[in-house]
Amino acid sequence: MSDQWLRKVGLIVSTGSKGLDLSNMRIVFRVNAPDAEAPPTAYIRVYNLNASDAKSIQNEFQTVTLQAGYQTGNYAIIFNGTIAWVGRGRESATDDYVDIMAADGDEAFNYAVVNTTLAKGSASAQAQYNAIVQQTTKYGVTSATASSSNLSSTGGVLPRGKTLFGLARSSLNSVCRSKLCSWSIQNGKIVVIPLKGYDNGTVLEINSRTGLVGVPVATPNGIELQCLLNPYIQVGGRIKLKQSELTTTTVKQQGIYPQYGNVNLPADTSTDGTYRVLVVEHEGDTRGTPWYSRLICLAIDNSSGSVLPRG
């Protein structure tokens, strides 16, 4: 078990080779990374900056990198993206702040356009994906090494040619869904994972000894839980829970649970306690109480055999 005390944060705003290190200030942050075909976002509040630094963040710096963890334990980047807007204000007579709202890959998500035709005999899922990534790369979003090969692991080539036209994200939605995959943006890279697969990294055990806070609960949205902040928890990765620490519900008569009409069934639990992370939200305050990771997970269908290698 890694040390999980003595909080550590690294916050740098930059433009090109010029940067400003804000790590020693009081920092409050919330990072949300969904497996929902959308960019991760970060809200960051920095307290009591001098006027010149606050002005530089407003008018000059364009990107932000946030690291979090522990001085002698897990410590890694939890967000790297483009600053969308900056606000300044005062919280009290003694404390002022600068708010930074940022997104990872939002320019590619909003502006990348694909306009090409793949000839008959060459319109495979991988070829379509490569054409899409060629356009997102212009906005700084590239492909995780294994994503294209993961798309090509099933199926073949379309019998006719294929025209790709419109927003790159729409074409990416189409090609991924045709192969029963989902995609997400993580640190400037497109990561594609089968719906029944997972990122083949280290399985992180989460229990009362490794930082679990409260009790995991099976809900209609998935297995929801909270733990001490762990920067190595990523969308598509795996965690392992003790089944004895999980609150479950068994529905025997659907008509009386939880209401008549629409029935929300709780998520299935895993027999071996292994789950895929669908959503992770990191929340922290360097001089306050919050220092948590909140997760929504689903049980892994091990019959699939679909695994995304690291890369």
Image (cartoon, rainbow, N blue to C red):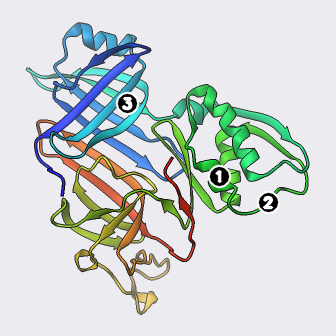
Q: Position of residue 58 (x, y in %)?
A: 35, 15
Which is closer to the viewer, label 3 or label 2?
2
Would residue 290 appear left or right of 262 to someone viewing this image? Answer: left
Would residue 26 appear left or right of 294 to someone viewing this image? Answer: left
Which is closer to the viewer, label 3 or label 1?
1
Tell whether label 2 touches label 1 (CB within 8 Å): no
Q: Say above or below: 255 vs 198.
A: below
Q: Position of residue 164 (x, y in %)?
A: 79, 41
Image quarter where the N terminus lies is bottom left
Q: Position of residue 130 (x, y in %)?
A: 70, 41
- Circle 3 is placed at which residue position? 101
Q: Quadrant of residue 274?
A: bottom left
Marks 3 and 2, how far apart at CA: 42 Å
Q: Say above or below: 195 vs 170.
A: below
Label 3 or label 2, whichever comes before in sequence order: 3
Q: Say above or below: 58 vs 167.
A: above
Q: Which mark is residue 29?
A: none
